[in-house]
Every structure is written in structure tokens, then in C-alpha cells.
Amino acid sequence: MDLSVISPIRLRLLGGAVDLLTPDEVLRFTARRVSQGRKAVVANHNAHSLALIRKCERMAQFYATADLVEIDSVPLIAWGKLMGVPIGRRHRSTYLDWSEAFWALAAEQGWRVFHLGGRPGVGELAATAIRGRWPSLNLAVHHGYFDRRSGSAENTQILNMINAFEADVVLVGMGMPIQETWILENRDRLNKGVIFPLGGAFDFEAGVQVTPPRWLGWLGFEWLFRFATQPRRLFARYFIEPWSLIGPAMSDVLTALRRRKPANR
């Protein structure tokens, strides 16, 4: 399926728009856009982002302008199935799901990949680890500790650096909502590139954070592993923030009931 021509199914769950995409489809979309030299933004939704779009206007604007929105949440998939949506675990798509296939494709195709974000030194550690698996990879990195204000000298310097590198793919790992805001404000100033908000993925690549076992991700309990490793930082996100989604959840239930009603006549 050529995703640059045929759009995937887009639906609304818990107040946010998501696309029914598999990791393979995301990579094929990326490859198509790179071959065309066209820009694109591939976003991702989970419970945290769904809560943020309700209180952060810039986050809502970011998702409204994204070309694709991956589903980065097994619980969100389970909720969709409960609502009668034709969704399955194959539609779970996040960096840890497609990373090895992505780096293999990037090395094979000679893509120029730029990672922006993380603490100073972490990107270099991650790049060394990734190049250890894919020696021919063309990967550049820069930390996320700079003046991110639009029009600032440092931000302009970063944009010039990415454009001079001629990045085919730009990975932005600054955490929500900082990375999404940066992409929203700077997308038009990049000459090309498929842009992914990546969170702390390079922290895992660098080994400064422990990577959750993938089987936990497929079971929907990756969040519990993360909470166990960072309880103070993640308590509110996992145990308080989801309550803000009760309203959108009730809206989903009403929509599902309306959808099923004709079949019961």
C-alpha cells in the first residue's frame, strides 16, 4: 500500500485523531516521502498526549497538522476494540516497535538521519551504539539544551545545521509537549525531512535508561515498568492524568452505541 496516495483509516478515540497503521506501513510512508524529498510529520498518541491536547493549545495544533498519527498505546487499542473499532495490536506503532527495521532501512537506503534532543553527550552515546549495529549509517546528533524560542540565534543555528546536513529524517527527542511545540514552530523552516517526535528513545539507545522488555509492551504493561523505574516523575501521568479523559471516553461510548443501534432494530 502506498500511503502517500491511499490514506489510512483515521478515527477518533478518547478525543484524539489516530491512524490505523502498522509499523511496516509507517516505514513505507517514510521511504516514499524521503524518495520524493518531501516533508512530513509522523506523530503518535498515547494517554499522556491525549490529556495534553485538552489543556495545551499548541499540542492540539500540532496533532491537527500532523500527516500521520501512530497509536503508541496498547490500552488505547484495547479501548478501540471495546468501542467496536476495527483495530488490533498490529496497529501499535512506536519507536521501540520499528527501530531496528528503521535503522536497517536507513543504512540500506543511505538516509541522512539527524537526532535533536536529550542531555549533552547522550546523543553521542546513542549514535555510537546504533552505529555499532549499522556501521554505514549516516547519523548526526545535537543535544536539546539550547534556546528553543523561535527566531533565537541558537534555534536558527540548529535549523541551519539540520538543513546543511540535508537530513532525510529528523528525530526530535525532547519529551511532550516540548518536542511537538518545537516541530510545530519549525517544520516550515526545514528544507526537507520526515519528522518524528521521539521522546526519550535515545536515552534507551544510550543505555542511560533501562529499555522495557518488548513483551511487556505487547501486553500493555510497559507503563508499569516505566513507573517502577521513575515513580516520582510518572505517578501523576499514570494515576491522575487519565481521569481527565473520562469526558472523551463517555463521548466514545455514545458514538459506539449510536453506531450499533441500527443493527439492533
Image (cartoon, rainbow, N blue to C red):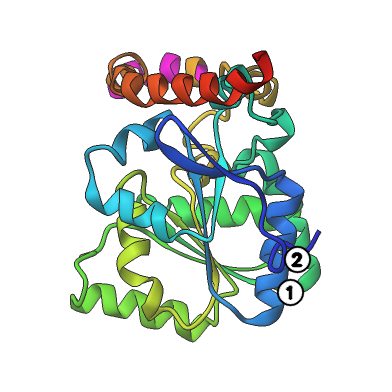
Q: Is residue 178 left or right of residue 45?
A: left
| Residue that appears at 81% across and 58% down | 1
Tell me whether the residue at label 1 lies in contact with that at label 2, contact meaning CB atoms closer than 8 angstroms.
yes
Kind of residue at disc 2: Ala
Q: Is residue 173 left or right of residue 140?
A: left
Residue 258 percent across, percent down from the top left? 52, 23
Mark 2, secondary structure of its residue? helix
Residue 7 percent across, percent down from the top left? 66, 58
Secondary structure mostly seen in magenta is helix
- In the picture of the structure, the residue carrying the numbered disc 1 is 110
| Residue that appears at 77% across and 57% down | 104
Residue 65 percent across, percent down from the top left? 42, 61
User: CA gap, disc 1 to disc 2?
Assistant: 5 Å
| Residue that appears at 75% across and 66% down | 107
Kind of residue at disc 1: Gly
Mark 1, secondary structure of its residue? loop
Quadrant in the picture for the C terminus: top right
Judging depth in this view, the residue of 61 and 250 nearest the camera is 250
- In the picture of the structure, the residue carrying the numbered disc 2 is 107
Q: Is residue 2 left or right of residue 217?
A: right
| Residue that appears at 27% across and 73% down | 155
Give, as a single range, the part of the protein colored magenta.
225-233
Q: Is residue 151 highlighted in magenta?
A: no
- Position above or below: 241 against 66: above
- The residue carrying pointer 1 sits among few (fewer than 14), some (14 to 19) or many (20 or more) residues within 10 Å by Cα, namely few
- Position above or below: 232 against 183: above
